[in-house]
Image (cartoon, grey):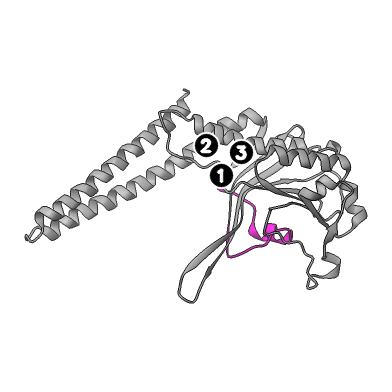
C-alpha cells in the first residue's frame, strides 16, 4: 500500500476509535445519571457528560471532513489516472443550476446540488462530468414534508468542434421528469415534438423529441441509434441524451452520488476503488458508445490546466 492510501487508512481507523470512545462516553453518561439521580451532584455529572459528548461530536466532524478531502485527493485521483492521461478533478465544483435549467431538458424543483466535477480528455474527446441532484420538497397543510427526486446521477457534457443547430432529446423509457417543451404554452419556435424513426427496436426503448426533423436526422443516424441501444444494454441505469446549444449532454440516472467516501473495511479500499472504477467506466462507455462521428467531437485543446 502506498503512502497516500496508508495515511487515508490511518485516518479512517482514527475516526473509528473516536466513534467507539463517543459511544463509551454516552454509556458512561447514562450510568452516571442512574447513579447520581436524586443527589446534589446529578446536574453537574450530567453536564460534564453532555459537554464531553458534544466535544467528541465536534472533533469527529472535523476528522470526517479531513477524511473526505483526503479521500477525494488520494483515491479519486489514483483511479482517474487509470483512465485519463489528462484530467482535472474539482471536488467542490459543479454545473450552475441556472445553466442546466436554461437547457430546457429537465424539470427543476426546490432542491439542487452539483459537485465532483471531472474535466478530461478520453480518446481525443474533451468532456466535463459532474454529480447532479435535482428534487422538489413540498409541505402539506399538516406540516408534513415530502421530497420527490427528479434526477440523481452523472451529468456528462461534450462540446463538439463543429457547429450544429440540432435541438434533440433522446429519452430512454423510464427516465422521468424531463422537460420536453411540447406544451402549447411553450413558444412555437422552441416547442419540440415526437420524432418517429424507422428503427422499431429503437422506438420501443427510446422516445425522440426535436424541433426540426431534418436537423435531428442529421445526427440521429442508424449507426448512432444502434450505438445508443448497445449502450443501454451496457449501462444498468436509465439515461437521456440531448443535443442542445451545440453541445451533447448525457444524463445517467445512477440514483447515487459518485466519488463519496465510506469508512474503510477490513483494512483495505477494494470496494471503494471498485465503485470509483464503475463511475469512470460510465464516462468511458458513453464516449466510446455514442461518438460515432468522432471528427465532430475531436478535442481542439489538449492539456488540462
Image coordinates of residue 203 in percent, x first then y, are 82, 50
Which residue is painted at 33% across and 46% down in the image?
Answer: 59
User: Residue 167's image quarter?
Assistant: bottom right
Quadrant in which the C terminus is drawn? top right
Are the two marked residues, 3 and 2, in contact with CB atoms closer than 8 angstroms?
Answer: no
| Residue 140 seen by the camera | yes
Which stretch appears magenta?
Answer: 92-112
Image coordinates of residue 204 in percent, x first then y, are 79, 49
Residue 99 on the magenta span? yes
Location of mark 1 (residue) = 91
In the rendered view, would you say 295 is above or below 132? Answer: above
Numbered mark located on residue 279 in the image: 3
Are the two marked residues, 2 and 1, in contact with CB atoms closer than 8 angstroms?
Answer: yes
Image coordinates of residue 104 in percent, x first then y, are 74, 61
Location of mark 2 (residue) = 73
Q: Main secondary structure of the magenta part?
A: loop
Numbered mark located on residue 170 in the image: none
Q: Nearer the viewer, residue 85 or 290?
A: 290
| Residue 243 seen by the camera | no
The mark nearer the N terminus, 2 or 1, is 2
The mark nearer the N terminus, 1 or 3, is 1
Q: Judge from the rendering whether residue 113 lies leftward or rightward of residue 184; answer left or right.
A: left
Image coordinates of residue 200 in percent, x first then y, are 85, 47
Are the two marked residues, 1 and 3, in contact with CB atoms closer than 8 angstroms?
Answer: no
Amino acid at each position: 500500500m502506498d503512502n497516500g492510501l496508508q495515511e487515508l487508512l490511518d485516518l479512517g481507523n482514527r475516526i473509528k476509535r473516536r466513534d467507539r470512545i463517543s459511544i463509551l462516553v454516552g454509556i458512561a453518561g447514562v450510568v452516571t445519571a442512574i447513579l447520581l439521580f436524586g443527589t446534589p451532584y446529578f446536574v453537574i455529572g450530567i453536564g460534564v457528560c453532555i459537554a464531553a459528548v458534544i466535544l467528541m461530536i465536534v472533533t469527529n466532524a472535523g476528522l470526517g471532513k479531513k477524511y473526505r478531502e483526503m479521500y477525494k485527493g488520494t483515491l479519486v485521483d489514483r483511479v482517474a489516472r487509470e483512465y485519463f492521461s489528462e484530467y482535472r478533478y474539482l471536488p467542490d465544483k459543479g454545473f450552475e443550476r441556472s445553466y442546466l435549467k436554461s437547457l430546457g431538458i429537465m424539470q427543476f424543483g426546490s432542491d439542487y446540488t452539483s459537485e465532483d466535477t471531472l474535466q478530461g480528455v478520453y480518446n481525443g474527446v474533451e468532456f466535463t462530468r459532474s454529480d447532479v441532484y435535482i428534487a422538489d420538497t413540498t409541505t402539506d397543510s399538516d406540516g408534513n414534508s415530502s421530497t420527490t427526486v427528479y434526477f440523481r446521477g452523472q451529468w456528462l457534457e461534450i462540446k463538439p468542434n463543429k457547429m450544429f443547430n440540432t435541438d434533440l432529446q433522446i429519452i430512454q423509457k423510464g427516465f422521468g421528469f424531463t422537460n420536453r417543451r411540447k406544451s402549447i404554452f411553450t413558444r412555437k419556435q422552441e416547442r419540440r415534438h415526437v420524432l418517429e424513426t424507422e428503427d422499431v427496436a429503437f422506438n420501443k426503448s427510446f422516445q425522440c423529441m426535436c424541433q426540426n426533423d431534418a436537423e435531428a436526422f442529421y445526427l440521429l443516424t442508424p449507426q448512432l441509434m444502434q450505438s445508443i441501444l448497445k449502450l443501454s444494454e451496457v449501462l444498468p441505469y436509465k439515461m437521456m441524451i440531448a443535443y442542445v446549444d451545440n453541445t451533447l449532454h448525457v444524463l445517467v440516472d445512477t440514483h447515487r452520488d459518485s466519488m463519496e467516501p465510506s469508512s474503510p473495511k477490513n483494512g483495505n479500499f477494494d470496494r471503494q476503488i471498485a465503485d470509483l472504477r464503475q463511475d469512470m467506466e460510465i464516462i468511458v462507455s458513453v464516449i466510446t458508445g455514442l461518438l460515432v462521428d468522432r471528427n465532430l467531437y475531436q478535442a481542439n485543446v489538449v492539456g488540462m490546466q
